[in-house]
Image: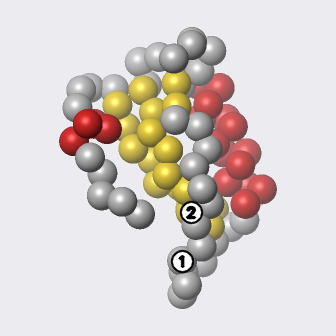
């Protein structure tokens, strides 16, 4: 994955989440729940890393804005 840019965490409330789950279905459910709670970047490509268990994805969120607010 790319390095986390200072832009992504430039102010309080901005977070970068690297999520690892056993399978894509579980990962999708977690991402959907986070999108309902906070404003997020949405689902990112799912990655499989050879030699590591599960699947991983990265998303960006603003915990000061709810998921139902527009951009």
Which residue shows up at 57% across the image and 13% down it? 70
Q: CA distance from mark 1 to mark 2?
A: 8 Å
Q: Nearer the viewer, residue 10 or 38?
A: 10
Which residue shows up at 33% across the image and 26% down it? 13
Vertical comparison of 14 with 3: above or below:
above
Q: Quadrant of residue 8?
A: top left
Vertical comparison of 4 with 9: above or below:
below
Instruction: Give the number of marks.
Output: 2
Looking at the image, residue 14 sits to the left or right of residue 21; the answer is left
Vertical comparison of 48 with 24: above or below:
below
Q: Residues within 10 Å of mark 2 (few under 14, many from 20)?
A: many
Residue most extreme to the bottom: 51
First-in-chain label (1 vs 2): 1
Q: Quadrant of the N terminus?
A: bottom left
Looking at the image, residue 8 sits to the left or right of residue 36; the answer is left
Which residue shows up at 59% across the image and 37% down it? 42
Looking at the image, residue 61 sits to the left or right of residue 20; the answer is left
Q: Nearer the viewer, residue 9 or 45?
A: 45
Q: What label sits on residue 8 in the rendered view?
A: none
Q: Secondary structure at mark 2?
A: strand
Q: What label sits on residue 56 in the rendered view?
A: 2
Which residue shows up at 56% across the image and 62% down it? 56
Residue most extreme to the right: 25
**Do the residues bearing badges 1 and 2 touch, measured as CB atoms within 8 Å?**
yes
Describe the colour scheme in one phrase: secondary structure
**Residue carrying label 1:** 49
Q: Quadrant of residue 7?
A: top left
| Percent x, y of residue 47 | 58, 66
| Percent x, y of residue 26 | 73, 55
């Amino acid at each position: 994955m790319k390095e986390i840019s200072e832009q992504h965490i430039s102010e309080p409330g901005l977070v970068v989440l690297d999520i690892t789950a056993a399978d894509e279905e579980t990962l999708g459910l977690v991402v959907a729940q986070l999108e309902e709670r906070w404003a997020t970047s949405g689902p990112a490509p799912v990655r499989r890393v050879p030699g590591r268990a599960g699947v991983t994805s990265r998303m960006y969120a603003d915990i000061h804005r709810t998921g139902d607010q527009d951009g």
